[in-house]
Image (cartoon, rainbow, N blue to C red):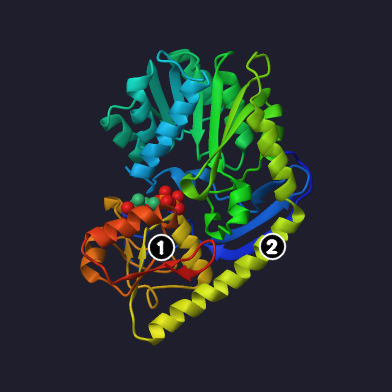
Amino acid sequence: MTCRICGEATSLLLDLGSMPPANRLKASRADTEQHYPLAVERCLSCFNLQLTYCVAEEELYSHYFYLTPDSPSLRAHYRFLTDHMFGEGYLSHDSFVFEIGSNVGRFLEHLKPLVGKVHGIDPAGNVCRMAVDNGIDTTCGFFNRETAAALERTHGAPDVIVARHCAAHNKDPHAIISGVAELLADDGYFLMENAYALNTLVNNEFDQIYHEHMFYYSIRSVVRLFALHGLRLIDVLQAPIHGGSIVFVAVKDGSKAAERPSVAVEAGREAAVLTEDLLKKFVDHVHVNRARLSDLINEILGRNQTIWAYGATAKGVTLMNYVGLDSRHISYCADSTPIKQGKYIPMANIEIRSEQDAFDAQPDYFLLTAWNYKEEVISKIRNSGNMTSRFILPIPTTQII
Ligand code: TYD
């Protein structure tokens, strides 16, 4: 096994078994499921973590159920990003901003009134149609060197390219990054946001591991990846969104843009904390937490109490299936996304219902499978008049809150 970033040898870190793709919700309980190995390996040369087995992208993304929710915490995050980009001079009011993996266009919708022009690309046809209907110019397709060249001919070179939570979703990030190097204006900026491997490990977020997350990026692996395509890291930001994300800003090698102090600060912190020892602690903790959550759920069910999951998240699919929870343990899973409702969590076979159904049902416990939105979710449930349900927080460690 070799590192798909730097080519050095890798070794196995954690094997979660055979699992269905997390966003492949089922229309009925009886639908057939494909299961694929779900295991993470590590590269001790560039500290890249990657899946051992990558499901074909067409299978994962051609029809997609993940629609970026319209959430106050995401809107706040978009403001945080754009404030920083304007503040540092990465963005101006006449910039052309191009987004890779733009989904239904939420971030571009936020940017559109602030900049000159926006355009997105996304591989899922159903999602692109929603973006276009919403007034966001979107090309349907995978982003790579070829599509980059075609986009440059039709739209020109963007001043800013954004790739939020998508560079980990592809087995060959070199295809995306070489496309960026091809398309970006010579004095342009590339902003890439991902779940940060350091946070995933420190916060024991093993549920971030699913087939779409083929990479868990560190600063060291990203510096290596960018350098191979003539890009230079000049800024690093951390943000609490999605359980702890990292934002990398890069420029082309020829650009005069100065490196911000954040690069040395964050790289130094990472070198001190993201070590082989942390990897070992993470794996130990995953095994302990799996047993704790399973024991707690069985104890609650033993008292004849009911549990719903809240958030039909991809994370929740890994969490419930790895812990061995199914419709015998979890009555239903609530989710605000209309296209998820009425469908079933693969393998666990738990039916997804609306939030209103969850408010009406008032189960004894909610398992917070959307723990990254826990404040929003808990206040929504309390505001619905439900003052009695309790909440199981599964990550970083199982506890009732
Ligand atoms: P997200 O955290 O982006 O998860 P993942 O990347 O693991 O799939 O997804 C959040 C899910 O939670 C999404 O399906 C919408 C749902 N949700 C609610 O049902 N209610 C809410 O209040 C919020 C914020 C999200």
The residue drawn where x is 57% and y is 25% is: 180
Q: Residue 298, percent across and down?
A: 45, 81
Amino acid on which the number 2 mark rests in the picture = Lys
In the displayed structure, would residue 168 be above or below residue 231? Answer: below
Alpha carbon of mark 1 to alpha carbon of mark 2: how far?
24 Å
Q: Secondary structure at mark 2?
A: helix
Q: Which residue is mark 2?
A: 281
Q: Neighbour class for label 1 at 10 Å: few (<14), some, many (≥20)?
A: many
In the displayed structure, would residue 85 be above or below residue 42? Answer: above
Residue 114, quarter of the rendered image: top left
Q: Residue 372, percent across and down?
A: 44, 53
Q: Which residue is mark 1?
A: 368
The residue drawn where x is 41% and y is 63% is: 368
Q: Is residue 12 visible?
A: no
Q: Residue 186, percent across and down?
A: 59, 13
Q: Is residue 281 left or right of residue 64?
A: right
Depth check, front residue: 321 or 217: 217
Q: Neighbour class for label 2 at 10 Å: few (<14), some, many (≥20)?
A: few
Dot 1 or dot 2: first in sequence order is: 2
Q: Is residue 93 visible?
A: yes
Q: Is residue 137 left or right of residue 218?
A: left
Q: Secondary structure at mark 1?
A: loop
Depth check, front residue: 336 or 317: 336
Residue 281, quarter of the rendered image: bottom right
Point out which mark residue 302 bears: none
The residue drawn where x is 45% and y is 61% is: 317
The residue drawn where x is 39% and y is 38% is: 76
Q: Is residue 269 left or right of residue 173?
A: right
In the displayed structure, would residue 241 be above or below residue 290? Answer: above
